Image (spheres, helix red, strand yellow):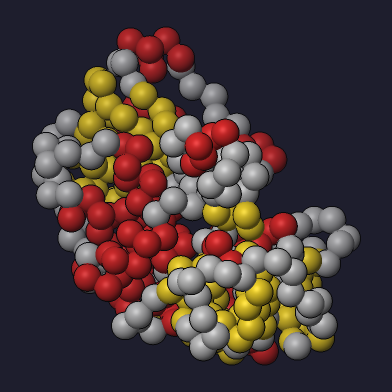
């Protein structure tokens, strides 16, 4: 079976033999796997690793008594699923599960022809193409980001970072009936800007042209959704009105993992910063429902499709092509 690996800046395809199924596992034919921003940058260690976690596939074999699943069924995978048995799960705190059931624990990933997965992570889907179905995983992340911000119809929202998660958060904010949604990103990312306009952004603000601190929103920004790196939180704090909620999912490495800000100003403005980390995934079924109902237009988000053999070009496209929004591998 062919599978893609990465090691530093190298991406290569090798043959891999899958082990036998263990209890409560399934074997999938991978139908499609989306490229996440975290897939673009390889681990700097020497160890080669498989990758790809936005997965839609067809069940080829199963070793589970789960009555939802059967051979030949199309499913998507949660990248991590609460166990339902630990104390946190039993106390209605599944997001704090201490025994995550995950593809990372096997490990077996989606940039491959076949893979193994925990049966509990599989969610059957219908009436979607596999490419659109892969959006279930990042859409669940966007749902959590929006949930934590407690958006209301009276909200004026700023979304910082117009990658797929930011754009899906834009669609969800519009679905909540907010007053205004502004999006901040670079206009040379033409694919992102086009989708933001299609999804109803009130304005697309390029911080290279106008600093967010200087932009005249003509309203008080009481909700900020940050998918850009941690240092950009400074701009979020300055733009946010008194009592605003900032939800955050951006990731940085090295110096970009840190943010220095005036805590006194943060305090006096009564701001709230809420970290979104959608692991375990809790909104997979809802994400599929939103895609089926067209609340989030999945087809509009998918800009490129590549076969597995061209994964190096696909990663380069996702990283550098200005027209790229969501790039999907179809093995």
**Residue 250 in view here:** no
- Quick check: 292 above or below 287? below
Q: Position of residue 178 (x, y in %)?
A: 14, 45
The percent position of residue 129, horizontal first and vertical second, equals: 38, 84
Q: Please say if 308 is above or below 84.
A: below
Which residue appears at 12% of the width and 49% of the height? 177
- Name the spot of residue 84 as percent of width and height, x first: 53, 47
Quick check: 276 left or right of 53?
Answer: left
Q: Is residue 266 above or below residue 292?
A: above
Residue 53 appears in which quarter of the rendering? bottom right
Number of callouts in the render? 0
Residue at (51%, 81%) from the top-left corner? 70
Residue at (50, 37) in percent of width and height: 90
Q: Residue at x 47, y 62 (%)?
A: 137
Residue furthest to the right = 46
The image quadrant where one finds the N terminus is bottom right
Which one is in front, 91 or 124? 91
Q: Position of residue 143 (x, y in %)?
A: 35, 51
Displayed quadrant of residue 237: top left
Quadrant (top left/top right/bottom left/bottom right) for the C terminus? bottom right
Examine the rendering and report whether any part of residue 314 can be seen.
Answer: yes
Report the front residue among 31 and 188.
31
In this view, the residue in front, 289 or 208, is 289
Taking the image as shown, residue 189 lies to the left or right of residue 257, namely left
């Amino acid at each position: 079976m062919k599978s893609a690996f990465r090691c530093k800046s190298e991406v290569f395809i090798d043959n891999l033999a899958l082990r036998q199924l263990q209890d409560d596992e399934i074997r999938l034919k991978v139908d499609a796997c989306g490229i996440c921003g975290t897939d673009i940058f390889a681990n700097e260690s020497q160890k080669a690793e498989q990758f790809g976690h936005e997965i839609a596939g067809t069940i080829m074999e199963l070793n589970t008594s789960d009555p939802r699943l059967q051979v030949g069924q199309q499913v998507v995978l949660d990248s991590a699923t609460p166990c339902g048995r630990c104390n946190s799960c039993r106390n209605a705190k599944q997001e704090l599960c201490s025994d995550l059931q995950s593809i990372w624990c096997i490990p077996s990933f989606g940039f491959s022809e076949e893979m193994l997965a925990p049966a509990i992570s599989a969610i059957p889907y219908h009436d979607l193409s596999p490419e659109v179905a892969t959006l279930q995983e990042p859409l669940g992340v966007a749902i959590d980001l929006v949930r934590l911000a407690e958006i209301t119809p009276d909200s004026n929202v700023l979304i910082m970072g117009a990658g797929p998660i930011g754009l899906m958060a834009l669609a969800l904010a519009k679905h909540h009936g907010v007053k205004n949604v502004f999006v901040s990103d670079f206009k040379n990312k033409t694919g992102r800007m086009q989708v933001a306009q299609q999804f109803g952004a009130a304005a697309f603000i390029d911080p290279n042209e106008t600093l967010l601190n200087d932009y005249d929103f003509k309203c008080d920004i009481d909700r900020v959704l940050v998918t850009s790196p941690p240092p950009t939180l400074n701009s979020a704090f300055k733009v946010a009105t008194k009592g605003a909620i900032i939800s955050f999912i951006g990731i940085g490495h090295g110096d970009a993992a840190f943010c220095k800000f005036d805590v006194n100003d943060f305090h006096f403005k009564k701001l709230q910063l809420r970290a979104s980390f959608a692991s375990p995934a809790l909104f997979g079924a809802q994400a599929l429902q939103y895609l089926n109902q067209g609340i989030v237009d999945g087809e509009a988000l998918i800009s490129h499709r590549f076969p597995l053999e061209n994964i190096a070009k696909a990663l380069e496209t996702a990283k550098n092509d200005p027209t790229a929004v969501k790039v999907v591998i179809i093995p």
